Structure formats: C-alpha cells, structure tokens
Amino acid sequence: MIFENYLESPQHIFFGLSLPEKQSNSIIAINKSVCEQIEGCNQWDQTHPPYISLYHTMIPGRNVETFFKTAETLSNQMISFSFPWSSVETDIHTILLWGSINDVLATFQLAVIETINPLRDGLHPSKYDQMLPHFTQEEKDSLNRWGSPWAEPFDPYVVIAKSKNELPLTDIDIEWDYKECIPGGVVAGIINDNQTIAHYDYFPFASS
C-alpha cells in the first residue's frame, strides 16, 4: 500500500494547480538563483515543480489515500481554463507570485475546499496556533472553518522561494513577463515537518 507510511499520524497536505512548463522552468531557475545565496531555502526541481496553491491543511493519516483519490476525481471533473498573473511580492522570508482570481478559478477552489475539508476531522497545522495572535478576524474565521487561514477569501499564488533565514532581497531581480496562466491539471501532496515535499502527485484535467 503506497500510503501505509502515513497512516499513524496526521499529515500536512497541499492541493494546487500545475504550471505551464515554460513558467514552471522559469520559477525553478529563479528559485535556484535565490537559493544559491542562502541556506535553509526551499528548492523546486523537475521532480517537485512549483505549483499554484489552492489549499493547505492537515488530515488524519487514515484519510490520506482518500485525499489523493479525491484530488484525481476533482481533476477529472475540470477542463482547462486560464487566469491572469498579478504581481511578484517579496518580504524577508518569502517571494510570492500572485495571480488574479476569476469566476472559474473561484468556483473550482471552493469545490476543492468543500470536498476536502471533511477529511480534516477538525485538524489544522499546529504552526497556525502560534501565529493566531497575528491573524486578522477573517483569517481566524477561515482557520476555524477550513483548517487554513487563507482558504477564504482566496487568492492564487506560487511560492517562488521561501527560507527560514532572511532572503538577500537587494541581490534579487525578478522579471516575470508572462501575462496569464493556463494550468494543465491538479497537483496534490504531503509536506514534511521541515517543509520539504514527502509525496507529490499530478492529475491532468479531463481536457487540457
């Protein structure tokens, strides 16, 4: 059984959308240039490529297999669509690429969280408990309802680079010339305690 190693304890799962190959390769290249300058930086590669984040939360280990089956089902119910890119945002620990939500993406993301949320059995990542005093009321409400502070309201984003240490922002020059994104499918996975990816699956849309 492929998921037997995850049965004994809660698992931090993610659900997202795949990036077009050229855009994915561009982010991998930017990520590499940033991570070469600092320790403790997340690293994307062809095995674990970057993705558009739709939902992060925690589920019991017994529900992991169901989660991946659900991800495949959701992908089979979706056809290709597009949404526009918005901006690149940087702070001392994170570089994010933001998208602009449209009706199609909003409808799909809502279907995702409504379908996966019952698998949580009330769990959420424990790291959010320490962050709770800094959350807005909106983020607290989202955490209580969905097990994630940023599930509702939702804005699509890609983590270009993230580090426990301060990023060398003065040495980073990011050019992003792509105007829109056309995802080809769904990605779903499990995140380790050290924020690396333990398991990663890709499920193409029914029409992409």
Image (cartoon, helix red, strand yellow):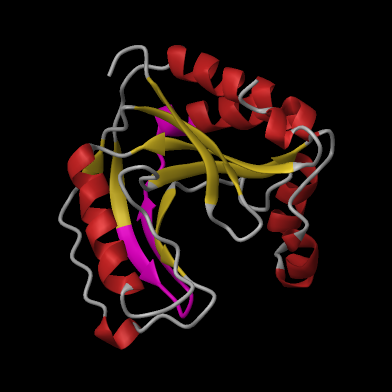
Displayed quadrant of residue 207: top left
Any part of residue 107 in sight: yes
Identify the residue at image location x=76%, y=56%: 140
| Residue 74 versus residue 93 in the image, above or below | above
Q: In this view, does 134 lie above or below 85?
A: below
For the C terminus, which image quadrant?
A: top left
Depth check, front residue: 80 or 188: 188
Instruction: Name the residue: 54% across, 75% down.
Output: 164
Whether residue 118 is visible to the viewer of this picture, yes or no, is no
Up/down of 38 relative to 59, above or below? below
**Closest to the observer: 10 or 174?**
10
Does residue 47 appear to the left or right of 118 in the view shown?
Answer: left
Residue shown at 78%/27% (left/top)? 62
- Residue drawn at x 81%, y 43% is 123
Start-end of magenta stretch = 87-106
Residue that extends furthest to the bottom in the rendered view of this protein: 170
The quarter of the picture where the N terminus appears is top right
Question: x, y (%) of residue 8?
Answer: 81, 37
